[in-house]
Amino acid sequence: MIKYEECLENCSKTVKETLNKLSNTKADAPTSQAYIEMWRSKSAILSTLYQTLTDRQVTLMKERFKKYQEKVDNPQSTIVMDFEGSIKQLTKMYNEAKDNVKFLTTLERQFRALGTTGLVGV
């Protein structure tokens, strides 16, 4: 069970660090295309992390460790709660990034037209 505990702690730490880093990420340039690329990059990173941590094996490991904690009656351990909180934050940011990419992709053609010819082209 120590391996489960270490794994859940490492996963929580990785998620928190990744979310913190992505929260502070800014577009490379003050252009609409750079903004779109920033959200695509965030979405790709969060998607990979989300898919990995919501995998069946990870869920089973979490449930097994949770049952073990209940069996041992260790209410002071917050490992599972921290992990679930991290997954909740990850899910929120993942959905936000996915929605932003979807929305910005619909506007991308217009952004490109504005970038090359200004408002006259539109």
Image (tube, rainbow, N blue to C red):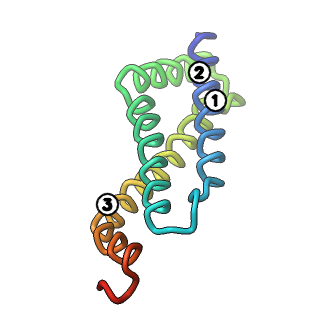
Q: Are marks 1 and 2 in contact (CB under 8 Å)?
A: yes
Q: Are marks 3 and 1 in contact (CB under 8 Å)?
A: no
Mark 3 or 2: in front is 3
Front position in the image: 79 or 93: 93
Residue with the mark numbered 3: 102
> How far apart, in angstroms, are the residues tagged by discs 3 and 2?
41 Å
Q: Amino acid at mark 3?
A: Lys
Look at the numbered disc 3 and give the secondary structure of its residue. Answer: helix
The reply, left or right, for residue 118 in relation to residue 14 is left
Quarter occupied by residue 23: bottom right
Residue with the mark numbered 2: 69
Residue with the mark numbered 1: 79
Look at the numbered disc 2 and give the secondary structure of its residue. Answer: helix
* Residue 16, placed above or below residue 14: below
Q: Are marks 3 and 2 in contact (CB under 8 Å)?
A: no
| Numbered mark located on residue 26 in the image | none
